[in-house]
Amino acid sequence: MTIAPVQVFLVDDEAEVTEALKWLLDSVKIPSTVFNSATPFLAAVRDYEGPLCAVLDLRMPEISGLELQQLLLQQGHDLPLIFLSAHGDVPAAVNAIQSGALDFLQKPFNPQVFLNSVNRMLKLARDRHETRRRRLELDKQLGQLSLRESEVLNHLVKGNTSKEIAQLLNISPKTVDVHRANILHKMQVKTLTELRRKLEERPAASS
Amino acid sequence: MNHPRIASAGNHTGNNVGNCAEALPEHPFPSELVLENAIVGVCYMIERRFIWANSRMASIFGYEDGELNGQPVRKLYLNEEDYQAVGNMYATFAQNDTYSHERAMVRKDGSLIWCLIAGRMIDAGDPRSPSVWVVQDITPRKEAEDQLKRTNQRLEQIVERRTLTLRRSNEALHVEAERRKTMQTELLESREKYRALFRHIPLGVLFTNAEGEIVEINRTIQSFTGARTKRELAQLVQDADRVVEADGSSISLAEFVRRHTPRDGRRVERCAMTWRSISGKLREYSIVASALEVHDLGAIVTFEDVTEARLAHKREHEQQMALAQASRLSLMGQMNSALAHELGQPLNACQSYVSGIRHRLGEELKDRPELLEALDKISTHLDQAGDIIHNVRSFVAQHQPKFEAIDLVALLRQTLSLLDMQIKTREVSLDLDFEDDALCVQANSVEIQQVIINLIVNALDAMVGLPQSERRITLRLGQDQRGKAFLQVSDNGPGVPNELLGRIFTSYLSTKSTGLGMGLMICRSVIESHGGTIRYLPGKPSGACFRFTLPTGGAA
């Protein structure tokens, strides 16, 4: 399974700024794409499946960075964001951070500060992407279990022994063991402990 | 019963006419003679025909003696109607014994004659019985009566006319009396009104005589002098320390009034007066002295206290100055802010490129210390420039004007009243298209007002070359689909040339010979700092249209 490379989307109506930032990111081998307005950016976010993060200018003619942030949240995209501003917008900065933005930089900013910020954002993007990927995989594996296997899994997770499960489901302990072997195989784990850990991580991932 | 009398009468008439004289000695009654000489007409009739009529009877009607005998009575009647009317009476008067009436009849020659006629039936009760009639000529009496009646009528007419004339003059007299009464009431009212006015009007009023001496002063003047009694007032009026002249010297009110009473043919004189009260406080009055053309009076002088108005005017002026100051400060802040914004972008790009170069060259730079040093210096200078911008920005941020809820409609109207003179002198017509009566936005009114002024003045300037009928500015104000307030300023000017479209809000670009090219840049900076946007739309069919939005209600 190929993993899509991490991407930084640069969104600013000032083309000079986005071009320069892209050049800077290129020099440290961070792939980025430039957008000078909101609509193509939103479309690209919807279509991109790999780890993604974005640098948004606070003030753009069509739609402000803050409005864009709200739109992304409404559409269920949790990509990490950094805001740029050419003004002293302190209230807007507070607002952006409160809504989950990672950083807020005032132009002109130190490029190293920007790169550090982008790196933190990339790590977060990869983590979120990995979590999402694992959750999808787990959901897929659970989907492969038969109805009976799901029942057995339910009891196994509660800590019941094969004997107890056989009694509860009115089947032989041997059959329970077969189910158990199949479950471990389908969930791609070796031990019951490993399976439990894998399932326990799930609620955290779905948040 | 009466029958024998007829027979005897017949006897007399027929046979004894000639024997009258002979009968005298025996004193017989000479009935025929008597009848013949009676001074009234007498006749004997059967079936409405004369059997016998005396000579008087004949002469009354203009006939010869005896001519009537045997004639029907009809010929004496004026008409058939009268004849029948009397004929109809027979049945009645036959029973009532006698009949008498006055009637106009006709003589033989056709002339009219008034007669008193009295008749009696020989046999009462039989309408067909023979009858005796006595006739008197009453024409003179009738004429006299007529004369009397006419005179009487004339008299009555005269009396009536006189009465009418009298009544009319009486009515006129009454009306006149009413008029006088009303006039008197009006005069009284007018006098009362004048008195009330003179006493209570919040305007000082005094009258002078022809020599300019004060003859009457109203209460308002007394109260502003502070006098409690008439005597005090009289003293204060003559006090040479009360009216302060422009040069600081003082004179009395009496002298002041004398000096300012209009003379030499002038009708009205206006001036100002400063009054020093006993406590030393100064009050200012606006004076109007008007000459009076009334016997013995010189002028009416009014005193209006303008102290408060002057103070208010002064305060208003100070407020305007403060506003202008705030506006200048705000303009400076906005210019700085715009500058910081404009410089920040290219500076940022430079820093990014320098940093990119470092990363790209990486290890190579270690072998090229002179390049590394140059890059370090570039970075240091760029950082310095960046620091300056940050400093300017934080200075502006510290002096950031406060945002508050303001009504954009009211602000626009207020701004238009500021620009009223300019719009009128340029002869530009205004079209207002407001969707709402009030539209609340979170903004700083001084800054937004500047933006509006900027856009309208730009529109005015853009239409200088147009004929007056085409000089028109349209202002649209409302809320867009996203709930933001918008204001659109459109003109009929030439619009923005295509090649300049991308730069109008950013560079120091001006199409005006005297322009600095900062107006639209500041507009953009202001609007964006409010969380709004400003855009240029080409006008339809020509001209420019600038539209800005502002967040409504909530925090900007």
Image (cartoon, grey):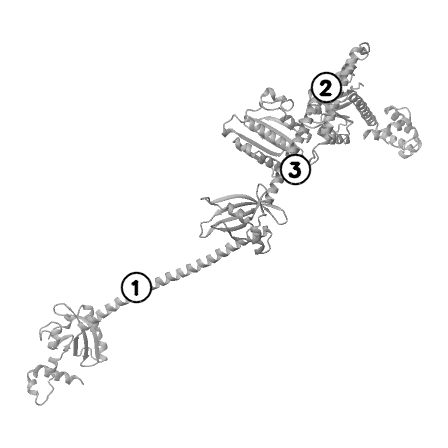
Mark toward the start of the polypeptide (3 vs 1) = 1
* Quadrant in the rendering for residue B81: bottom left
Q: Could you tell me which chain the residue with mark 3 belongs to?
A: B
Instruction: Report whether A148 appears left or right of B438.
Output: right
Q: Could you tell me which chain the residue with mark 1 belongs to?
A: B
User: Where residue B333 sits: x, y (%)?
Assistant: 68, 29
Q: Is residue B484 visible?
A: no
Q: Could you tell me which chain the residue with mark 2 belongs to?
A: B
User: Where residue A170 sits: x, y (%)?
Assistant: 90, 34
Q: CA distance from mark 2 to mark 1?
A: 120 Å
Instruction: Report whether B22 appears left or right of B401.
Output: left
Residue B247 vs B358, above or below: the answer is below
To which residue does mark 3 refer?
Answer: B406
Image mark for residue B349: 2
**Amino acid type, mark 1:** Arg
Camera-nearest residue between A170 and B545: B545
To which residue does mark 1 refer?
Answer: B161
User: Where residue A155 sits: x, y (%)?
Assistant: 89, 32
Tag 2 near tag 1, CB within 8 Å = no
Task: Farthest residue to the top: give it.
Answer: B367
**Amino acid type, mark 3:** Ile
Mark toward the start of the polypeptide (2 vs 1) = 1
* Quadrant in the rendering for residue B453: top right
Quarter of the image with the N terminus of chain B is bottom left
* Quadrant in the rendering for residue B397: top right
